[in-house]
Image (tube, helix red, strand yellow):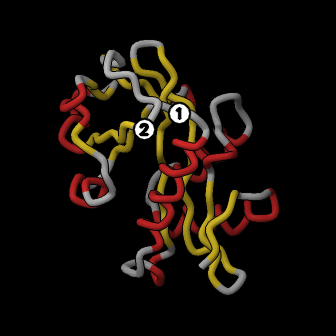
Amino acid sequence: MLIRREEPRDHDAVRTLLTASFEGDEPRLVERLRGGPDGLPELTLVAEISGAIAGLVVGSRATVDGRNAVALGPLAVLPRFRGHGIGRALVRSFVLVAGLRGERLVGALGDPAFYGDLGFVPAANLGIRPQESGWAANFQVAALPAYVPAQRGVFRYAAPFSG
């Protein structure tokens, strides 16, 4: 498995991956993030197996109390490759790259057990709330080396997530 930055040549395979992984509008969300100022191409990674795209994690700008943060997601793995550690490898790579870039905090909405095994904690533990109160039970954060404990408040996703 090779984990690398997404490239334009991957877009068709990524669209297929997202369509196979979600019932929602994730393909359009990813396209909006790619085309706008909030997408973070340095943190949009693919997992490639034998030349085929097997997984994806998307990075985008977010804020907490007006300070920069990073949103992780969507995260997707083709159904036939699930259960082989691809999602975990993508998240670990994402967090590592985000930390090396000097980012402070990563937020993720998803299974607390999955993200907890990867170093995320419930956002409330750091005084952070998701922009939608109904997400609280499944919203986690990873504090990176540059994290400032005073960064508390509401985690806000980029505008394309609201569209």
Q: Residue at position x 62%, y 57% from top?
A: 45
Front residue (pair 86, 13): 86
Mark 2 touches mark 1? (CB < 8 Å): yes
- Crowd around label 2: few <14 · some 14–19 · many ≥20 (10 Å): some
List the single residue furthest toward the right.
9
**In the image, is residue 25 above or below residue 15?**
above
**In the image, is residue 88 above or below residue 85?**
above
On residue 147, the disc is none
Q: Can you say which quadrant of the picture contains the N terminus?
A: bottom right
Which mark is first along the chain, 1 or 2? 1
Front residue (pair 33, 58): 58
- Crowd around label 1: few <14 · some 14–19 · many ≥20 (10 Å): some
Residue 144, given in percent of the width and then of the height, sits at: 42, 38
Q: Which residue is mark 2?
A: 144
Disc 2 from disc 1: Cα separation: 7 Å
Residue 61, given in percent of the width and then of the height, sits at: 56, 31
Q: Residue at position x 74%, y 37% from top?
A: 35
Label 2: which secondary element: loop
Q: Quadrant of residue 46?
A: bottom right
**In the image, is residue 46 above or below residue 111?**
below
Residue 124, given in percent of the width and then of the height, sits at: 20, 30
Residue 11, given in percent of the width and then of the height, sits at: 73, 60
Give the number of marks.
Answer: 2
Q: Is residue 55 left or right of residue 91?
A: right
Amino acid at dot 2: Leu
Q: Which residue is mark 1?
A: 103
Amino acid at dot 1: Glu
Q: Residue at position x 53%, y 31% from top?
A: 163
Q: Is residue 146 left or right of residue 143?
A: right
Q: Residue at position x 40%, y 14% from top?
A: 65
Label 1: which secondary element: loop
